[in-house]
Amino acid sequence: MEQLVLYQPPRAWGTPNISPFCAKLETYMRITEVPYKVGAFSRSKAPKGKVPFVELSPGNFMGDSQLIIEELEKRLAAEGKTPLDAGISPRDHAIARMVRRTLEEGYYFVGLYARWHHDEGYAHMREAFKQFVPALVVPLVRRMQRKKLHEQGTGRHSYEDVMAMGGADLDALAELLGDRPFLLGDKPRVIDCTVFGFLESTLGFPLAGPLKKHGESHANLVAYRQRIRERWWADLPASTGASA
């Protein structure tokens, strides 16, 4: 497979990325050994105006982490290599889809609330964003994110209620994982890239808030995150949000 160019924000806090979606996609590329390099951060070429996005070939850009992964799965199969979800059962595929949608379309907004709506979380986001955007732009980003949260609905709830919602999602994830090494069994699947990305965004965030503390209360989630870091992200420095 031709080397891809991955466009995303820089790493922060010793985690794969400030964005769970970027962490998800790059984790997939590492597990499947898809050749890639990271390009300079830019949204000007993003086909959907969001990150991550990739350049599949010169001038051929593609956005959306899930659509990119689905395209790469097809390319691996076409090259005679084994896609990550090869042989997955219909039931496991259904479970994976429901977990992914819960994390990406529900839990994501809980994390957004903790990072951008809440002042203590925003303090960390402000400093991280100054790495790649002008400082005067960051308050505008916050205003946009808070508006998004209000329109979506999560921003209309109290901090305590939103953290309780997120905690219940983490409880459900821990129950589904159980004592298995990966979400669906003994080997990683595409869904593990999503789960890992969102656990990194929670457990790797510098603020020791209620969401992070709740995640750390589940030993299996902490071990799962560490397992994937050690196997596919050994080049990362120790996370500033890592558990003791």
Image: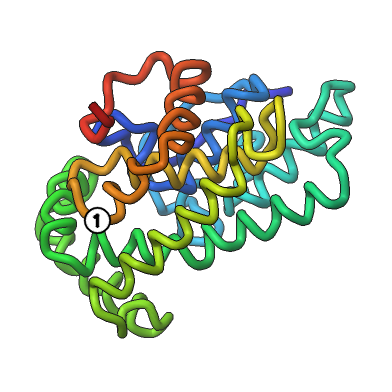
Give the quarter of the image for residue 162: bottom left
Image position, residue 139 (x, y; %):
14, 66
Q: Residue at x 49, y 48 (%)?
A: 21
> Mark 1, residues whose alpha carbon is within 10 Å: few (<14), some, or many (≥20)?
some
Is 210 or 236 nearer to us in this picture?
Answer: 210
Whole-percent x, y for residue 93 in the image: 79, 49
68 and 30: which is toward the camera? 30
- Please state, as top left, top right, bottom left or bottom right, where the C terminus lies in the image: top left
What quarter of the picture does the N terminus occupy? Answer: top right
Can you say whether 103 is above or below 142 in the image? Answer: above
Residue 227: x %, y % from top left: 49, 22
- Residue beneath label 1, please? 210
Quarter location, residue 115: bottom left
Q: Is residue 162 above or below residue 54?
A: below
Q: Count the labels in the image.
A: 1
Is residue 99 or residue 214 the one in the foreground? 214
Left or right: 31 in relation to 143? right
Q: Is residue 235 left or right of residue 194?
A: left
- Using the rendered view, name the quadrant where residue 128 is placed: top left
Q: Is residue 213 above or below residue 4?
A: below
Name the spot of residue 241 as percent of width and height, x first.
Answer: 24, 35
Q: Amino acid under label 1?
A: Pro
Residue ID at (61%, 61%): 101
Q: Secondary structure at mark 1?
A: helix
- Please name the residue shown 45% across and 31% down the image: 225
Q: Is residue 179 found left or right of 71 in the rendered image?
A: left
Q: How is the image coloured?
A: rainbow
Up the image or down, 59 lies above or below 149; here it is above
Relative to the observer, which residue lies in front, 173 or 116? 173
